[in-house]
Amino acid sequence: MTKIYQWSLVLLLGTVTACDSLLDIDPEYTQDAENFFNTEEDFNRAIVGVYDMMQPAYLNLWVGEIASDNAIAGGESVNDSRGLHEIDNMSHGGVNDELRAVLRVNYTGIARANYLFENQDKIDFEGKELILAEAKAIRAYFYFNLVNYFGDMPLIVDRRISISEIPDAARTPKAEIYAQIESDLRAAIAVLPWTVSETGRMTKGAAMALLGKTLLYQGKHAEAATVLGELIDTNEAGYALFQDYETLFLVQNENVSEDVFTIQFSGLQGGDYGCLICLNGNAAVGFQSIRQYTGPVYGDGNSYNLPTDDLYQAFEEGDVRRDASILNLEAFIAAQPNPDEITYAIGGGGHTGYFNNKYIKRKNELGLPDDDLTSPLNYRVIRWADVLLMAAEAFQRSGNDERARTELNKVRDRASLSPVSSSDEALYQAILEERRLELAGEGLRFFDLVRTGQAAEKIDGFVNGKHELFPIPQVEIDLAGGNWEQNPGY
């Protein structure tokens, strides 16, 4: 079985670091459409270019945890990735490099997908329908990210947008964006196969899971229950919970039965600190590892995205997911035969004593040549446990507590925890708490709190009516000629 890695097609479509324009996918040396999309190979190269823009998943991983009660920003100092510290403190505004990167990365991915649709009629060949279905599913993923970060945004489908058009590109109501996401995913589901020979390509199951998530985020609980229930009941891909949770997030246990929608990485270099978008590896892993660490098992890193004690203490006694998700560094050192020989540094950006044990550098997983940037550890966008918990929530909210308990308790049983027998609101809250514990460190917590209306209660400094959305980067408003209004409160 081959594996589709994410790699930058600079000569084909460029990168988001090429210039300061929002949707510029035509840097110098770009191959234009007249000389491209003339062969099946061209279409295959183009779809890999679309996959490539899923690579900056570390942004979702960071923001989704740091903005919540699950983690603090960390790092060398408060000026090291200042935007993350502002998000951590709920003091972020329109000037924020990390949020600008989120917007640019996702729109560049959309533009790459649209480039395919713009030229879809140039030639016909067997398999083109499948490539276009993949492009629709990935475009839906990019728009899903944008609407949940920023709300109303320009909706552009089936064509690229030139720089001169940006001032006239009005923000589209998020309901219309969600409708486009649903349309793209339903069309993709009708074409995509359950299994693929090239690991990492979009599948029917991945698209169904993302559709269920899209419906759940809109509060369309009955529809979400239908889609997620069908995925669970049909399950022709053979999805299942990986039984050993303690080793689930090791490289050797990637692309197992639990993987539904997973972004693939390799241990090759690709880029550097000047172009994180160019990387072939998972940048989050090195950034989240232990600063100046010398000792067994783990590698050194930059101490970002540090779990809080509140999260650590939220786990029940005996829950194997706690230590699998969160590294208690001092406890780990104390348990080693040579604790006095193990050293590490505390960064000025904050220290909790905990590290994200799911996405952390391990010595037997190092890439080359710069192991800070070359982790081959994949990013699980949606795994089967998430599907089960989304289904549990959707069923509970649409009045089927029995089915909700069934899906919830599958997840708890894997963690060797007693089943939940509650109903109504107590069951709903149990499902939400299970999401926090099961999916800790995976970048979902902030968005879960926002969509369920619990963010102000859980997140220090969160202001209702403001922080549900992130601000539009001011530089993009300026590039749009002031045509885009800033989100409320910023």
Image: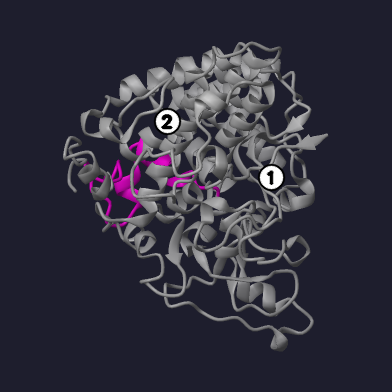
Q: Residues within 10 Å of mark 2 (few under 14, many from 20)?
A: many
Residue 338 among magenta residues: no
Q: Which residue is mark 1?
A: 415
Residue type at tag 1? Ala
Q: Main secondary structure of the magenta part?
A: loop
State the SS at label 2.
Answer: helix
Q: Between residues 172 and 252, which one lies in front from this camera angle?
A: 172
Magenta segment? 442-471
Q: Between residues 178 and 39, which one lies in front from this camera angle?
A: 39
State the SS at label 1.
Answer: loop
Question: At 56% across and 52% down in the image, what residue appears?
Answer: 278
Residue 450 among magenta residues: yes
Q: Quadrant of residue 447?
A: top left
Report x, y in % for residue 393. 50, 28
Measure the alpha-carbon separation of dots 1 and 2.
34 Å
Q: Which residue is mark 2?
A: 143
Dots 1 and 2: beta carbons under 8 Å?
Answer: no
Can you say which quadrant of the picture contains the N terminus? Answer: top right
Report x, y in % for residue 381. 58, 39
Question: At 65% across and 37% down in the image, what residue appears?
Answer: 411
Question: At 23% across and 38% down in the image, what residue appears?
Answer: 480
Examine the rendered structure and indicate whether residue 333 appears above or below residue 12. below
